[in-house]
């Protein structure tokens, strides 16, 4: 999941069926239809430059403007997590998974009319490699010559070669998941002459179905159709007007409820305000208000570098049996906020299979005590959380539950958001003093490999796993699974690894899968509501 993490989910739900327009042309009756988006300043639209954008609001807009080598289809889950070609026609990879050769389709053009060639993706990669502090750097830093670009010694990596409609990317180590990496917004096609910028470029010709026509930071964004779009996404709107001064999250919900805006991105917890009364008004998953499991896991990480949990898998399993997940979910907002789980893959990720390893309702204290017997090693533990009220309450409740095993727990708070890069960097810092930590865990790539390998293999965050656990058996299994083509065999392999990880290694105690909630205005046609898990703006339409 990289040096920075973000609570990003890509669940999709298609309600009904739509009469689709031809790509690049307005659907009949849709002329002049502008979709109104409202973002709270707190939501964090950081950049519209693909090399720098990192927040969900930014990624939602970039999804309408980007054309990528590979992408995810505008379909319901689990099909929404099937990697499919967009600008790429095909690719080959060397047996050692170090060299990728992509062949591009013809017909894609930027919004200024210029054709898209392989050089557009080479430039996108080199802009991420440049010394501009791109969060996408961790995904391509092992490209041959990447560190020379990052140090400012060269403008292009020797391992990235573009010739016409052929792109070759060479890595210094095997990189079996690179095709999935190309789906990230960092690697959208950009004009070959576009220089890197630490401040970000706001108006960039784009090759997706839409392009940004006006950007006033902290005020507004105007997005309109790309008149030269040559792809297959089914465009039905003429564009978007984005208000970047949408007020507080609750104000934004009320704005969409009234119809002053058509949609705005907000965390599920905002919708639980009883004064909003959304469930009574609209029900759930009918026409305007939707609640679905997302891609974010709320979990308790168990630090296997420190004496309490080091080489102590039975105690880690005991923690999983001792926790009352249903009580912890009630503290976190109940079933609208999240769905209980005891596994590492969210429900909507291909490869999830319910293995029923630990209790979801209540605890099994007898089993926990049996496993913990003689393995408490001093009986002291430090729980780390942020100073957010729900985090503190969750830590307090978990401490009460684990005290029944005989653990004496100290709660320490840090002034960071639970999903922030800074918080996770503190957890993985050498010598970090914590035994248990409350974490929101979401890889940027919605693939089983990303979720699982980051827990048992050395990862991008300082070259360390979150919990410092190593498992050669599981690492070997993961390297085998990631090489399998998408389909049943691959999903079965990941399901087996997920169950084995929970049952035998237990590096974390999964608690629940955070839901994503979406409210749209009455102007939005339900047949075009596709949730991934936030609204798929590129295929949205109005009544």
Image: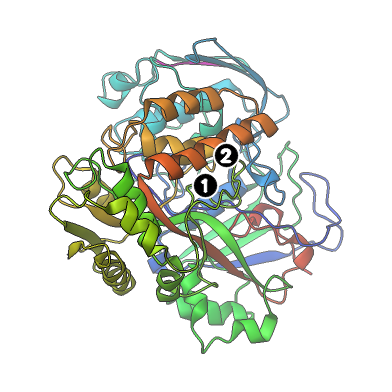
Q: Residue furthest top?
A: 95
**SS of the residue at dot 1?**
loop
Q: Position of residue 351 (x, y in %)?
A: 60, 41
Q: CA distance from mark 1 to mark 2?
A: 8 Å
Q: Position of residue 239 (x, y in %)?
A: 66, 58
Q: Residue furthest bottom?
A: 275
From the image, tell me which residue sits under label 1.
345
Residue at 55% across, 82% down: 254
From the image, tell me which residue sits under label 2.
495
Give the extent of the magenta segment.
167-171
Residue 1 seen anywhere in this rendered image of the structure: no
Q: Which comes before the other along the chain, label 1 or label 2?
A: 1
* Quarter occupied by residue 286: bottom right
Residue 302 seen anywhere in this rendered image of the structure: yes
Is label 1 in contact with label 2 (beta carbons under 8 Å)?
yes
Q: Is the residue 94 above or below the residue 197 in the image?
A: above
Residue at 41% across, 40% down: 504
What secondary structure predominates along the stretch shown in magenta?
strand
Image quarter in which the N terminus is found: top left
Q: Closest to the observer: 97 or 393? A: 393
Q: Closest to the observer: 388 or 322? A: 322
Q: Is the residue 62 above or below the residue 143 in the image?
A: below
Numbered-mark total = 2
Q: Residues within 10 Å of mark 1 (few under 14, many from 20)?
A: many
Q: Residues within 10 Å of mark 2 (few under 14, many from 20)?
A: many
């Amino acid at each position: 999941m990289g040096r920075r993490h973000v609570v990003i989910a890509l669940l999709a739900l298609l309600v009904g069926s739509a009469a689709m327009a031809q790509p690049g042309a307005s659907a009949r009756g849709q002329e002049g239809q502008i979709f109104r988006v409202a973002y709270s300043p707190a939501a964090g639209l950081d950049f519209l430059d693909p090399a720098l954008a990192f927040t969900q609001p930014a990624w939602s807009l970039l999804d309408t403007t980007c054309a990528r080598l590979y992408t995810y289809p505008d379909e319901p889950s689990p099909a929404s997590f099937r990697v499919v070609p967009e600008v790429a026609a095909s690719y080959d990879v060397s047996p050692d998974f170090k060299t990728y050769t992509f062949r591009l389709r013809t017909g894609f053009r930027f919004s200024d009319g210029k054709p898209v060639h392989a050089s557009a993706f080479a430039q996108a990669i080199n802009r991420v490699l440049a010394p501009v502090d791109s969060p996408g750097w961790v995904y391509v830093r092992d490209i041959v010559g990447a560190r020379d670009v990052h140090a400012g010694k060269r403008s292009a990596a020797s391992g990235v070669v573009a010739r016409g409609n052929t792109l070759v990317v060479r890595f210094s180590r095997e990189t079996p998941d690179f095709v999935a990496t190309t789906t990230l917004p960092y690697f959208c096609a950009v004009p070959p002459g576009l220089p890197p910028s630490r401040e970000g470029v706001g108006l960039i010709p784009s090759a997706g179905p839409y392009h940004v026509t006006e950007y006033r930071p902290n005020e507004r964004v105007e997005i309109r159709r790309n008149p030269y779009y040559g792809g297959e996404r089914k465009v039905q709107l003429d564009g978007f007007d984005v208000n970047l001064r949408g007020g507080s999250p609750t104000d934004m919900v009320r704005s969409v409820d009234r119809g002053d805006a058509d949609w705005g991105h907000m965390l599920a917890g905002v919708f639980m305000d009883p004064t909003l009364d959304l469930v009574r008004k609209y029900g759930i998953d009918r026409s305007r208000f939707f609640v679905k499991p997302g891609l974010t896991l709320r979990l308790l990480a168990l630090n296997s570098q420190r004496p309490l949990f080091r080489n102590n898998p039975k105690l880690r399993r005991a923690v999983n049996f001792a926790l009352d997940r249903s009580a912890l979910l009630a503290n976190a907002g109940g079933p609208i906020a999240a769905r209980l789980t005891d596994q590492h893959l969210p429900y909507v990720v291909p490869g999830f299979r319910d293995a029923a390893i630990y209790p979801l309702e209540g605890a099994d204290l007898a089993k926990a005590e049996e496993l913990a017997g003689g393995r408490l090693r001093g009986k002291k533990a430090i729980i780390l959380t942020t100073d957010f009220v729900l985090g503190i309450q969750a830590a307090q409740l978990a401490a009460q539950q684990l005290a029944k095993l005989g653990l004496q727990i100290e709660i320490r708070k840090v002034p960071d958001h639970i999903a922030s890069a800074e918080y996770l960097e503190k957890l993985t810092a050498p010598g970090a003093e914590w035994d248990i930590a409350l974490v929101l865990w979401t890889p940027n790539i919605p693939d089983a490999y990303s979720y699982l390998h980051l827990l048992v293999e050395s990862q991008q965050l300082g070259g360390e796993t979150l919990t410092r656990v190593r498992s050669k058996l599981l690492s070997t299994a993961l390297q085998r699974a990631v090489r399998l083509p998408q389909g049943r065999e691959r999903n079965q392999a990941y399901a087996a690894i997920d169950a084995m990880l929970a049952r035998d290694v237990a590096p974390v105690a999964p608690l629940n899968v955070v839901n994503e909630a979406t409210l749209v205005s009455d102007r939005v046609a339900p047949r075009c509501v596709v949730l991934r898990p936030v609204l798929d703006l590129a295929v949205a339409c109005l009544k």
